[in-house]
Amino acid sequence: MKRKMSPMSKLYVALIFLFLYAPIIVMIVFSFNDSASTSVMRGVSLRWYKSLLNDSATIQSLYNTLILAVTSSLSATVMGTAAAVGINSFRKKWVRKTTMSVTNIPMMNPEIVTGISMMLLFVSVAKLVGVTDALGFWTMLIAHITFNLPYVILSVLPKLRQMDPHLPEAAMDLGCTPLQAFFKVTIPSISTGIVSGMMMSFTLSLDDFVISYFTQGPTFETLPIRIFSMTKKRVTPDMYALSTLIFVAILFLLILLNVSQVRGEKRLKNKLDKGAKQ
Amino acid sequence: MKKISKQFVASPYLVWAIVFIVVPLFFVLYYSVTDANGNFTFEHILDIVKYKDIMLNSIWLGFIATVISLVISYPLAYIMARSSANVQRTMMILVMLPMWMNLLIRTYSLMILLQDTGIINSVLSFLKLPNVHMINTQGAVVLGMVYNYIPYMLLPLYSIMAKIDHGLIEAAEDLGANKLKVISKVIFPLSLPGIASGFTMVFVPSVSTFYISKKLGGNAFSLIGDVIEMQFKASNNYNLGSALSLVLMFMIIICMAVMNRFTGDDDDGGVLI
C-alpha cells in the first residue's frame, strides 16, 4: 500500500534536494559568466566553453581517462568473472572465506591506504630494478584493475549461486564440451551480474581520484588529476564549464538508462498481460 | 577432475590479489618499521603520539558527519520507500546524479557557496543581514563530508526499507502499536543492517579524506588524511606516512568489527583480515 506524500514530507524532500543541488546550480550558472569571477555575475557568455575547447591538456586528459576506464574495466571484468566462477566452486569453506576476505580489502580499506600501499610497491620494485620513472599509465592501470575486481566478483558471485548447477551438466550430457557449456549456458545466465559489474568498474574508474593520485606519473594525466591541479590555483570558470558539460552528459545517460528500463518493464508487463488472457 | 579445472580459473585472480592487494599492505608495514635507510626502527610508530590530537579530531569530525548523514537520510529513505514507483525512480536519479559528479568538483562548488564573498554571503548582504564566516572552519569540513557522502548512507537505507514487508507494519498497527512504537519496534530493528552499511560507507571516506579538509578547512587545521598525503607528496617521508596509514587502517578495522556485530555474519561475506 503506497500512500501519497504528506506536505511535511514534500517539504523535507525538497529541502534535501535543495541542499544537494545548490552548489551544482551555482556552478552551472557561473560557467556562463562573462568575467573571471566566481562570485559576481557580469553578463552571459560562452567564453569559458571556448577556452575549454582550446585547452589541449584537458582534452587529452579526458581521452586518457576514457582509455584507462575502458581497459581497466574490461580486464577486471574478464579476470573477475573467471575468479567468481572459481571461487564459487571452492569446496573448502576456509579457502573461500579467506579469498573473500582478501577480496574485500580494497573495498573496506580507506582509498588513501590502498593508494599509498600500491605506490610503495611500485616505487620499491622500481628501485630494485633500477627504473626511475615507473609511475605512469601501467601503474595506474594495475591500480584501477585492482580496485575494480572486488566489485565485479561481488556482482557475479550471487548470480552464479542463483543459477541451477545442473544446467551446465545437462548441456554437457547433451554433448557440449565443458568450455562450450560455460560459454553457452553459464555466461548467459550470469550476464546481468557481469554487465553490472563492468558498468560499476567503468564508472568507478572514471571517477577515481585518490588512488590515481598516488599511482600517477607525470606522463599520464587523467581528468580528476587535471581537475585537482586546476583547483590548486585560483580557478577560472573554465572548470565550471567542464563540470557543467560532465553534469549534462551524466544526466543524459541516466535518463536514457531509465527510459529504456521503463520501456523494458512495460514490454514485459504487456507480455504477461497477454499471456494471462490466453 | 572437472571441479579442479573449474577452481583453476580463479588462479590468475588469486595471484593478482596476492601481488597487488596483500603484498602492498606488507610494504606499508615494512616502511612503518624502518627508517629512510632501511634500518629497523620503532621511531615512526612512536611518532604517532604526536599526531594523537589530529587523529582524534579526524575520528570525531567523521563521526559527526556520519551521524548527521544518518539523521537526515533516515526519514528521506522512509519517504522514498513508501512513494509510488515513478516517484521512487525519479528520486533515485536525483540522488545518484550528484554522486556521479567528481568529488573534486562537488567540493569545489560547495567552496564557492561558502566563501566570505560567496553566494550565501551575497544573499545575506542583499537581505541586509550580517555575513557569516563559514569557510575554513570545522563546520564547513563536516558539511563537505555530509554533502559528498550522504548518498552512500541514503542508498543502503532506502534499499533495505523498500524490502520491509508492509504487512508487518499493518500487523503492528492492528495489534495496537502507535506510530512511535511501529518505528521503534518494527521499522528500526529491520533497518539495522542498512544503518550499519551506510555508517561504514560514510565513516571510512570521511575519516580518511584529504581533499575536503584541504579545500573547506583551508590551512586552519588538518586531518589525518592531510598529514598522510603530505608525507607522500610533499615531505617524502614515506616511513612516517606508512606508520600513520597503518594506524588509520587499524582504526577502521576496529570500527568494522563493531559494525559487523549488527549485520551478523554472512557465509561468504568474509571479514576484513
Image (cartoon, coloured by chain):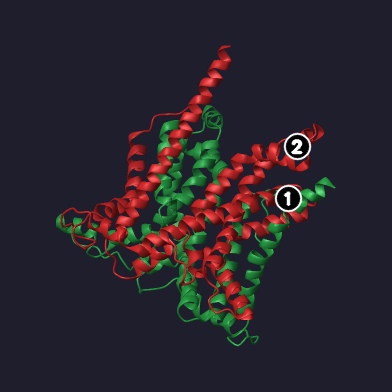
Chain colours: A red, B green
Q: Nearer the viewer, residue B91 or A1?
A: B91
Label 2 sits on a secondary structure element that is: helix
What residue does disc 2 label? A168
What residue does disc 1 label? A86
How far apart in space, not on screen, are marks 2 and 1 (Cα)? 15 Å
Q: Identify the residue at image location x=53%, y=25%.
A: A268
Residue A126: x, y in percent? 60, 77
Label 1 sits on a secondary structure element that is: helix
A96 on left or right of A149? right
The answer to which of marks 2 and 1 sits earlier in the sequence is 1
Residue A150: name its quadrant: bottom right
Residue A259 can be seen, yes or no: yes
Residue B80: x, y in percent? 44, 38
Residue A124: name its quadrant: bottom right
Q: Nearer the viewer, residue B180 or A149?
A: A149
Residue B175: x, y in percent? 55, 28
The C terminus of chain A lies in quadrant? top right
Kindly identify the amino acid type of the residue bearing the numbered disc 1: Gly
